[in-house]
Image (cartoon, helix red, strand yellow):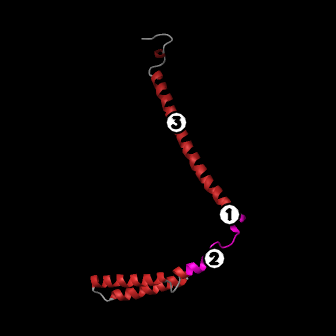
Amino acid sequence: MVHKGNALNARKGWAVASLFRKAQENVISVKSQIKQRKELKTFLARGGLFALLLLSTHPSFAAGGDLLASQDSTVTSTFGHGSSLEKYFYFGEIIMALFTYIRARSPLVFVGLIIVIIFTRVGFALAG
């Protein structure tokens, strides 16, 4: 069954194979375009991050004074040694140690309480 000028005139299976080949090439080209777009987005995101890092290293951003220097006394009186917050921490630690002692019936809880109070004292001394 040979007809002149028809696609079936070609070698057996060539027309169908060429259609599948073209479809496969189209799928591959679409996949490569999607991959290129993803790579471009990643490049732009990293490039933007690099630009921000480069801008933040400019010397004009490094100069300046301490903006919170006026609040130093407030922070010290709120979080420093002898503040009311420190007393509330001590009260909370003692109450939690009592509850833990009632549950565990172990005097080692009070050794832990002393250790926690020492750490709290050191922390508030560093903050103040």
Give the quarter of the figure containing the C terminus: bottom right
Sequence-wise first label, 3 or 2: 3
The chief SS type of the magenta part is helix
Amino acid type, mark 2: Ser
Quarter holding residue 127: bottom right
Q: Which residues are magenta?
A: 59-76
Q: Which residue is mark 3?
A: 30
Q: Position of residue 47 (x, y in %)?
A: 62, 52
Which is in the foreground here, disc 3 or disc 2? 2
For the point 29% across and 87% down, the residue is 106
Circle 1: element type: loop
93 or 110, which is in the foreground?
93
Q: Which residue is mark 2?
A: 70
Q: Position of residue 92 (x, y in %)?
A: 39, 81
Q: Residues under labels 3 and 2: Cα distance? A: 61 Å
Q: Is residue 76 left or right of residue 117?
A: right
- The local crowd at label 3, few if under 14, some if 14 to 19, many if 20 or more residues have their Cα within 10 Å, is few
Quarter holding residue 88: bottom left
Q: Residues under labels 1 and 2: Cα distance? A: 27 Å
Amino acid type, mark 3: Val
